[in-house]
C-alpha cells in the first residue's frame, strides 16, 4: 500500500506475521490508510505533528511516557535500521491495551521529512514500557 510513501522494514513484516490472529484488522487497515494519505499529506505540507495527528485521532501517540523514553531497553526495542542509519521510532499507532496479540497491536514508525516518506519498523505486540 502506497510504496511511494511508506517503507515497511523486514522487522515490521516479521512482527506482523506473529500477530496474524489480531482481531481488528479493518481498523488497522483504516489507520494505515490514513497514515499513508492524510497524515503524510499534512506533514509534507509543513503542518505540525499535532495537526497531522488529528487525522489519526486517539489511535496515535507521538511518543511514549517520559519514563519509557528514558529506558535503554525501550529505546533499543524501538530502534530500527534503514538506509544505514539507526532510527528511534517513538511515534506509533495503537489499538487495544491487553497483553494479547489478538486484541492489541502497535505500529511504530518515523517520518523522514527529506524523503517525504514514513518508515514502519514494527507492526506487532506492545513493546517494552515502564509503568
Image: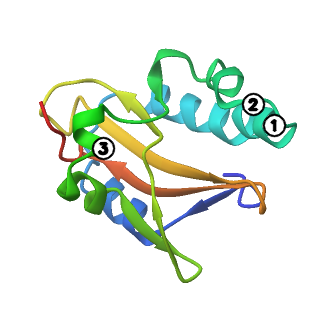
3 or 2: tag closer to the N-terminus: 2
Pointer 3 with pointer 2, Cβ within 8 A: no
Q: Quarter-wise, where is residue 43 in the image?
A: top right
Image-quadrant location for residue 83 = bottom right
The quadrant of the picture occupied by the C terminus is top left
For the residues marked 3 and 1, what is the alpha-carbon distance in whole angstroms? 27 Å
Local secondary structure at mark 2 = helix
Q: Earlier in the sequence, mark 3 or mark 1?
A: 1
Residue at (28% x, 37% y) in the render: 22
Q: Which residue is mark 3?
A: 69
Q: Which residue is mark 1?
A: 41
Q: Label 3: few (<14), some or many (≥20) within 10 Å?
A: some
Q: Which mark is drawn over residue 26?
A: none
The percent position of residue 79, horizontal first and vertical second, equals: 37, 63
Q: Residues within 10 Å of mark 2 (few under 14, many from 20)?
A: some
Q: x, y (%) of residue 69?
A: 30, 44
Q: Residues within 10 Å of mark 1 (few under 14, many from 20)?
A: some
Q: Which residue is mark 2?
A: 38
Q: Is residue 22 left or right of residue 9?
A: left
Are the residues tagged 3 and 1 within 8 Å (C-beta)?
Answer: no
When the figure is inspected, residue 80 is found, relative to residue 97, above or below; the finding is below
Residue 87, position in %: x, y?
48, 64
Left or right: where does residue 38 sit relative to residue 57? Answer: right
Amino acid at each position: 500500500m502506497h510504496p511511494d510513501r511508506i517503507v515497511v522494514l523486514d522487522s515490521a513484516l516479521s512482527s506482523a506475521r506473529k500477530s496474524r490472529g489480531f482481531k481488528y484488522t479493518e481498523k488497522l487497515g483504516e489507520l494505515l490508510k490514513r497514515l499513508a494519505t492524510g497524515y503524510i499529506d499534512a506533514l509534507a505540507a509543513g503542518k505540525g505533528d499535532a495537526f497531522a495527528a488529528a487525522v489519526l485521532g486517539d489511535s496515535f501517540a507521538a511518543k511514549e511516557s517520559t519514563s519509557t523514553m528514558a529506558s535503554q531497553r525501550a529505546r533499543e526495542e524501538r530502534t530500527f535500521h534503514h538506509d544505514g542509519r539507526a532510527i528511534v521510532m517513538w511515534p506509533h499507532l495503537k489499538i487495544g491495551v491487553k497483553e494479547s496479540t489478538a486484541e492489541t497491536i502497535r505500529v511504530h514508525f518515523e517520518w523522514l521529512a527529506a524523503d517525504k516518506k514514513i518508515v514502519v519498523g514494527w507492526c506487532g505486540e506492545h513493546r517494552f514500557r515502564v509503568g
